[in-house]
Amino acid sequence: MSISQAGSVPQQRLYEVAVLTTLLVTIYAFLIPQHEPWFDEAQAWLLARDSSLSDLLANRLRYEGHPCLWYLALRLPIGFGLPYAAMNWLSAAFSVMGAIVFWRYAPLPRLFRILFPFTFFLFYQFGVVARSYALLPVLMFLFCTLFPDRLKKPIPFTLTLAAMAQVSVHSALIALCWWLLYLKESRFPLTSFWNDRKQPAVQAAMIFVMGGLFLVYTLVPASDILRPDFFDKDTGTFLRMIFTMWNGPLTEIWPLSLGIFAASLFWFRVRGMLQWYLVPTIVLWLFFGALYGKAWHEGVVFCLWLSAVWLSFLPREGDTTPTEAVKNGRVLMHAAMACLLGFHLQWSLSSAKFDYEHPYSGSKALAEYLKLSNLEKSSIIATQFFSPAILPYFQDNIFLNFNKGKRPSFFWWSNHYSFNDSHEYIAKTAPDLVIVAYKFPDSSPHLTLPNYEKVGAFPGDLYFKDRKIEPETFVLYRRTKSNSLTH
């Protein structure tokens, strides 16, 4: 179903959408206040808060590897003076908008249409956790609504793809693949760029090209960027990453994932959607395998699969008298979706329950402790690059060793950034407080310097699907009085 067919939406479905939207908003109202944003969420907020628009677009994003759309969205609540908590409400708002589009327009059978917006990635990972990927479902679903009229109305179709490209590098790859497939399908004459620029198809192409050039301009890595060598991978690592990004978005149990994948390929081929799914999927797998991929990136692959499912259920000529292949494919696809939903709904429930009952990051609790104890004006040194997860709760940078205690407060991924958390530096500076951050196995939550006593630990754990994937814990140490007399 497309937006142009909105008038044909049954009244009953509109009531259904209203009820489901109320339910989703109510769940978020209970869950969002219990979520403690982690470093990646905080970094985006600090970048949007502490950068001018020109500096953000011309300089800062080159160190982040993320396009601009999420940061521009964050500047809205920041501009209105809203607190840090507004970020997660904004993420939830995009999730609700995506769910409304899905419930109203998706041509899937009713039970599947109702349940998919409550699955793990759509509801939790891209709804509660506030990152740029929150924008992806609503834009991909809008793409699906515009897909049937893509040849008649190329400008709104292309604008949606251009917006997708500004969400993440992964969605930019998807948008590029889809746009190239669209050009192939429409047999777009490249000479039209020069012969007739008033044609809607030509104007649409110019929009996409200009958006792509802007994307390249904002993301060309700076010469002094600080990053690990993503290209240092052997064949085994490459293949394991591709396997993870194939299996993870489905069930994580490879025989079941293989069945769902095979059923999907058969159904997409029968419905003429195979290339719209497989081409961008393979490109993403190669990107993750060759460059970089983390657990939450599985959600991009899941959204791509779900969009292909949407497109495959769009009505076509001959559906009134379906062939045997269509009948068999529909049965297989219903079974595949039912199996997948069983896993994703359980992951969604498990993640929501954990986040409601446990801290996702220790940053919020530590910030509240510092405020209640009137310690934010003390001299403070924090270890590890992700300690700025604490800083959005303060108007100023309270860490002496991050940018010399001045704004901007975000971690600048530059070789020229002023940051030092060595024991020698801490001993020489002798701050009132030391925050020891713990996330990786090679780091330690313990401070071995003499004359510092432990005040308290503020634990946190990033939770993914049905398990903890990494801690984000902070331990606070205070200088003892005997030590303070010697400095």
Image (cartoon, rainbow, N blue to C red):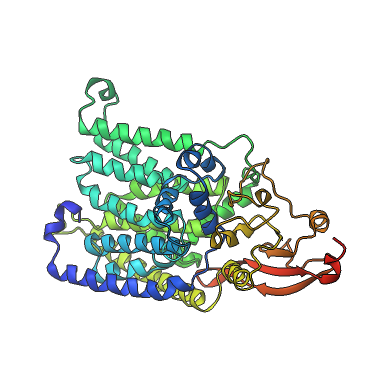
Question: Would residue 361 be visible to someone looking at this image?
Answer: yes
Residue plotted at (68% across, 57% down) = 384
Extreme top residue here? Answer: 195
Asked if 247 appears above or below 183 in the picture, the reply is: below
Q: Nearer the viewer, residue 375 or 326?
A: 375
Asked if 170 appears above or below 86 in the picture, the reply is: above
**Is 425 left, or right, of 260 in this rendering?**
right
**Is 108 left, or right, of 445 in this rendering?**
left
Across and down, in percent, residue 133 comes to 43, 55
Q: Nearer the viewer, residue 124 or 229?
A: 124
Q: Nearer the viewer, residue 399 or 461?
A: 399
Q: Quadrant of the C terminus?
A: bottom right
Determine which quarter of the picture holds residue 261. bottom left
Across and down, in percent, residue 469 comes to 59, 66
Q: Quadrant of the N terminus?
A: bottom left
Residue plotted at (73% across, 62% down) = 443
Across and down, in percent, residue 305 comes to 37, 56
Residue plotted at (86% across, 66% down) = 485
Across and down, in percent, residue 108 comes to 25, 63
